Image (cartoon, grey):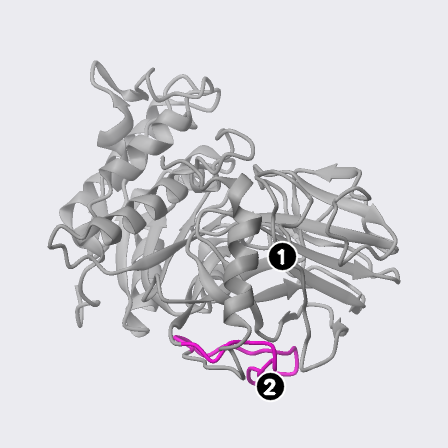
Amino acid sequence: MTKRHGYALLSAIIAMIMAVSAAIYVGVGFDDGAARDTMAGGRGPHNNPAAPASTGVWVGTWSTSPAGAEPGTETNGMAGRSVRNVVHAGVGGTAARVTLSNLYGQQPLNIAHASIAVAATANNAAAAADTMRRLTFGGSPSVIVPPGQQVVSDAARLLIPHDTDILVTTYSPTPSGPVTYHPTARQISYTAQGDRTEDVTGVPYTGQTQVWRYLTAVDVLSNESEGTVVVIGDSLTDGVTSSMGENRRWTDALADRLRLRDRDRDGSDVPRYSVVNQGISGNRVLAGGGGRPAGNPSALNRFDRDVLDRTNVKAVVIALGVNDILRTPHQTDPDKITSGLRELTEQAHNRGLRVIGATLMPFQGHRGYRPNLEATRQAVNAQIRSGDIFDDYVDFDEAVRDPYNPRRLNPLYDSGDHLHPSDRGYEQMAKKFDLDMLKGAAPAEL
């Protein structure tokens, strides 16, 4: 993993650059890589007068999948509180916009105020000097998000360096019912009583949480990236055993590799892509949870929303299948799993997207392990390796298995539960990913 920028110097650097930029940026310059609805009603993007007249393309710097309704929020939601989500920028940019979701809400969500800022330091609710920006929606500082819908903010001018934390804050004055959330953030976010949306000190933010609420994406106008790689997966992609607040998921390590490869170049023609993580712990290819909309929806159910509708998607990585085998009711027919994976690939190909799959990692020693389940895993992996499911594949199984017992994780990479990797294991997964696989477009057919 690369080390973070020195946060101690960040505030001064940003203030200096923004002072110079203020004389240059007038109006807005967009190049949407993909069509995006800005408001729930389906209107296109609104130009923010504060957004930059700048070159670059819109790409995803961070995203997460809405996974369900947060328990305990059924009546009041987050009424009367400010929610400050802390997320990590994989690539930098000169403007930003956010997506807020009320997918699992049963009442209109009233966002009275919202803001975005660069964090003063890692894992902190305080904003860096001169980076706090009020977000608008169609020019208004407030927005109503209908149940089951999402909104995309106007673009706000803000210099966001890569590999830094971003603060996205919302305030809802009225009860809104269930909160749409992502339960496995591996990041501390904050809450405060009252409307503290534009507070820069972080002092009122005494509440802490390990989930992300409402926020599902941050896009940036970037010269660092040409497009977005979307990774759809389960807890192994969600990074459930990675170190809290340190961005040690394998997708974080992959994003670092792509950025450093671009910086060094070495004559490489690997595309300059950002990486966004659409993992949901417990996710399966074929089966989803209950409810309408379904909590923890299957990959087949959520592929359009969580992958194809991301900003400026250029390639897709699919790392799914273990939970179809491991979770009850166990899917022991490998052909059903691989048929689902092929269907996902076909959907991506219909959009002209290249698809890289991942072999299923071992789990002997986990409480759910059974010999017949291991046979299914091996059969799925054999089909993946045959080359008739994806355009290419990364062999995560080979990367992390025990060389003396290939049914188990290598102890060097095992978090201790015999299913999920340690930080070192996640890094090994990213190292196994051949960046050259991202080159080129999808073939006409496999």
Q: Position of residue 377 (x, y in %)?
A: 31, 34
Asked whether 49 falls inside the magenta stretch, the response is yes
User: Is 274 situated left or right of 215 in this image?
Assistant: left
Magenta region, residue range = 32-54
Q: Position of residue 372 (x, y in %)?
A: 34, 27
Residue 239, disc: none
Q: Which residue lies at the image location 38% right of the left edge and 76% below the top edge?
A: 55
Q: Position of residue 368 (x, y in %)?
A: 47, 24
Q: Could you say which is closer to the camera, residue 258 or residue 348?
A: 258
Under mark 2, the amino acid is Arg
Under mark 1, the amino acid is Ala
Residue position marked by numbered label 2 in the rendering: 43
Residue 165 visible? The answer is no
User: Is 122 situated left or right of 442 in this image?
Assistant: right
User: Is 345 situated left or right of 440 in this image?
Assistant: right
Element under disc 2: loop
Whole-Å distance between the Cαs marked 1 and 2? 26 Å
Q: Could you say which is closer to the camera, residue 426 or residue 265?
A: 265
Q: Give above or below for 409 relative to 147.
A: above
Residue position marked by numbered label 1 in the rendering: 117
Asked whether 25 falls inside the magenta stretch, the response is no
Q: Which residue lies at the image location 27% right of the left edge and 72% below the top edge?
A: 352
Q: Which residue lies at the image location 40% right of the left edge and 16% below the top edge?
A: 365
Q: Give above or below for 229 relative to 405.
A: below
Q: Position of residue 226 (x, y in %)?
A: 32, 66
Q: Which residue lies at the image location 48% right of the left edge and 20% below the top edge?
A: 367
